[in-house]
Amino acid sequence: MTSVPNASSVIQTELDPIAKRRRIAQRLWGLDLQSSSRVDHLSAYFDHFRDQAGQLSVSMDDVFTAADILKNKPDSTRQHLRNTMTSALNHGQSTKDTTTSHVQHNSAVPGPQNITVRDSVIEETIVATIRVMLAVNINLDSRTVFLATLGLNWGESQSLTSFIKETFPKHAYNDEPHTPFMASRLRARYLEDHADVQLEWTHHLPDHLVLNIGSQTKTLRVFDLVSLLEMTYEVMKDEPWETSVGDSLKRGCYTPAFLYETLQTIRLLFPPQDQQWLDRKIEFNSRCAA
């Protein structure tokens, strides 16, 4: 087991980017990416992995350790998973002082007491792992980190399976007659040109297809890590359609039905004939963000 990284080891030198990306897919989902062109096609996800791990100063190997623990016991509570993670990482020799470094707080300001660097590393590793494996932004627990951040609340006594079911509730299929719709009018290009709906990209899967209607604007959030959906669906596509959430999480994935349906919404929004329009839009947004 690797030690908690220092600042220089967190920013991992990309000696062989292709090999590193293949290792990520293998360790998170057991997926073997043989073709270099396939790895390049999925580069958006691997850039996301690098950004999320770097943002929280978490090492790649610690993410893999957390992922293994989460997959092994998805029905365990968050507190139990944290304790297991602590035991696993404690086998390594930390480069930080994780036993005597504490945060002192003004008595008038509420906050965690006697928080060690180790507590923060464990919490940030769990949060980073959920982000890169399941594309869900969960909260950093204010009791175990110096500064809490916004995100969905995964409770201490709640299992990962229960949390995912709550985050993505399953709705009963309504087979009653309904008004037919034209698929072409659900294209993102049509919505933007004729319904004044602006697209907003998100890495947070629960926000996918959330429509915000303001006094002057309408914004549709669209999950943009399609590469994550493609990789995990490749892992799950041969599994029974009725595979449970818990069994799917043991593979680090959502259920095959959920992944298929989510990918279908992406294909409906961005059909092949709109690919050039989408490419121009992505290029324009990239220039604006630079």
Image (cartoon, rainbow, N blue to C red):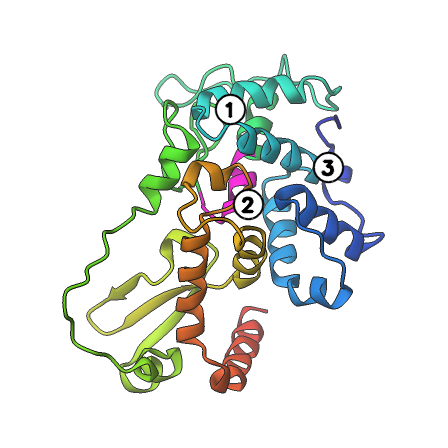
Give the residue number, with chain letter if any, for mark 2. Answer: 133
Give the class, few, some or many, for how many residues have Cα within 10 Å of label 3's Cα (few <14, many ≥20).
few
Q: Residues in magenta? A: 126-137
Task: Give the alpha-carbon distance from disc 3 to disc 2, as whole Å.
Answer: 23 Å
Q: Quadrant of residue 36?
A: bottom right
Residue type at mark 3 is Ala
Q: Is residue 37 magenta?
A: no
* Residue at the image point whose x is 60% and y is 28% from the top: 121
- Viewer-side residue, 238 vs 229: 238
* Residue at the image point whose x is 38% and y is 78% from the top: 188
- Magenta segment main secondary structure: helix
The label number, if any, that marks residue 7 in the structure image: 3
Of tags 3 and 2, which is closer to the observer?
2
Residue type at mark 2 is Met
* Residue at the image point whose x is 29% and y is 48% from the top: 170
The label number, if any, that marks residue 81 in the structure image: 1
- Viewer-side residue, 182 vs 88: 182
Q: Is residue 128 magenta?
A: yes
Indicate which disc, 1 or 3, sits on the residue closer to the N terminus.
Answer: 3
